[in-house]
Amino acid sequence: MWLAFDFLWLPFLACLVLTGIHAYLGLHVLARGVIFVDLALAQVAALGITIAFLAGHTIQSDAAYWYALTFTVGGAVLFSVSRFRRAPIPQEAIIGIVYAVSAAAAVLVVDRAPQGSEHIKQLLVGSILTVTPKEVGALAILYAVIGALHWAIRRPLLQISFDPEAALRQGRWIRWWDFLFYASFGLVVTSSVRIAGVLLVFSYLIVPAAVGALLTRSVTGRLTIGWALGSLVSVIGLSASYLWDLPTGATVVTTFGALLAAVALGLGVRTLIQELRQRGLSALIGVGIAGSAIVGMLGLLLVLFPQMDHHWLNWVEEAAPSVQLLFLTPRERQTYWDSQEAIRKGLADLQRLRAFQQEVQWGTRHMPADQEERLRQFLAGRSEITAGDRLVLRTLRSKARERQRYWLGVPLFAVGGVGALALARARRRGTA
């Protein structure tokens, strides 16, 4: 436990610093409806870092930072100019074009650089585990200054984000306020991408703000929820990455997605409970229609493509093997059970012998070199035999699928389709 704390406390502080500024900026991004502006600016910054890398500068160098900042300020100018212009191309389209072109240009540049794939990986998921106290301190100071600036000019910025029509009517300085927002936003993104990567920066910006918007309408409430959520995800993501030896950036991003899905599911269940209290069982008609449609679709896919991966049917057969055995001949069933028993014994032997091999490698047991080589060869051969038994099971499953397509697929499709149509008709009668 203490080892994990010693290893993760500095990355955790870096995550808290990211949460502090990004959760606030995310409120503006969601209110403006420019959801991918962070991703676009982050990719523009990544392009600047890539060009600096090709020019011979390291990713963490000051030169790379200024390359990235120069590119990002250029993107900020473009976005602030396009914000209030009446043009046939909406701003969201411009943001998407900037992102796509920047990403493609970065790939072209990296193609000429040595170890280009590693460079792209670092830009995407960052290297937050290797962050230094100096970097965290510098980020904290920079973001505190930007936060103080935004606090001082919060009124015009909030009005531009949450009531742009009123902002247009009240002053001619609106474009300068908007440029100041995008420029400071670009400075934050440029600084964050170097240690956290494009995906992590985007997640810290959007997900906390999105959850806050789901749970409350007030700006203060959204900000409080965003900060709390970012801190919680930082703890869970970093801990999971350490315990299961997973890539840190990707783990934190996935944790953000899982928590957002959990919040959305909880809100959906709450809404459904409220509907049940108000309307009774009729509130479940929509759920029944969706469930019936899913059942019908699963049956149709089984009929049309029996050899595709039907995971739901795999899970059912693992829980109740008779669902598959029912569609096999007596001889095939015997082969099924023989293969299952062979796999069980093979895995037990492999586990026992691998444990013995590890003891030999660690020096707790002694074995002559020739016997150790024979043990290695035996393990390889036993693994191939087990793989062969698994291939037999897959072949039997394939035969069962060809028969299940008619005896399971057609009934499921019929039941799902009829159920969905009947429930949809009942809902129409109820609203008529």
Image (cartoon, rainbow, N blue to C red):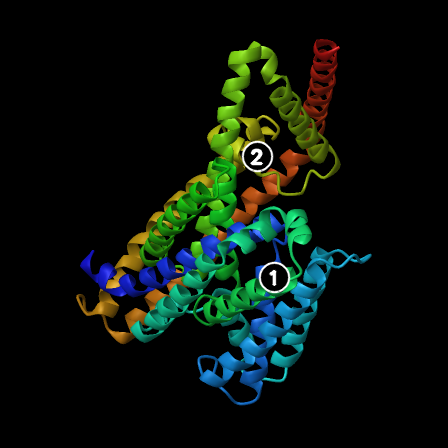
Residue 273's place in the image compared with 324, above or below, is above
Instruction: Name the quadrant of the N terminus.
Output: bottom left
Return the residue nearer the eye: 270 or 330: 270
Q: Quarter-wise, where is residue 302 in the image? A: top right
Which disc is residue 312 wearing? 2
Instruction: Please tell me whether mark 1 sits on a helix, a strand or a loop.
Output: helix
| Residue 389 in view of the camera | no
Say what amino acid the circle numbered 2 marks. Trp
Residue 413 relative to residue 386: left or right: right
Residue at 61% x, 60% y: name it: 37
The percent position of residue 51, horizontal first and vertical second, equals 59, 82
Residue lying furthest right in this view? 88
Q: Earlier in the sequence, mark 2 or mark 1?
A: 1
Q: Residues within 10 Å of mark 2 (few under 14, many from 20)?
A: few
- Indicate left or right for 423 with 57 as reference: right
Taking depth in this image into account, of 28 and 211 the one nearest to the observer is 28
Q: Which residue is mark 1?
A: 178
The three-letter amino acid code for the residue at tag 1 is Asp
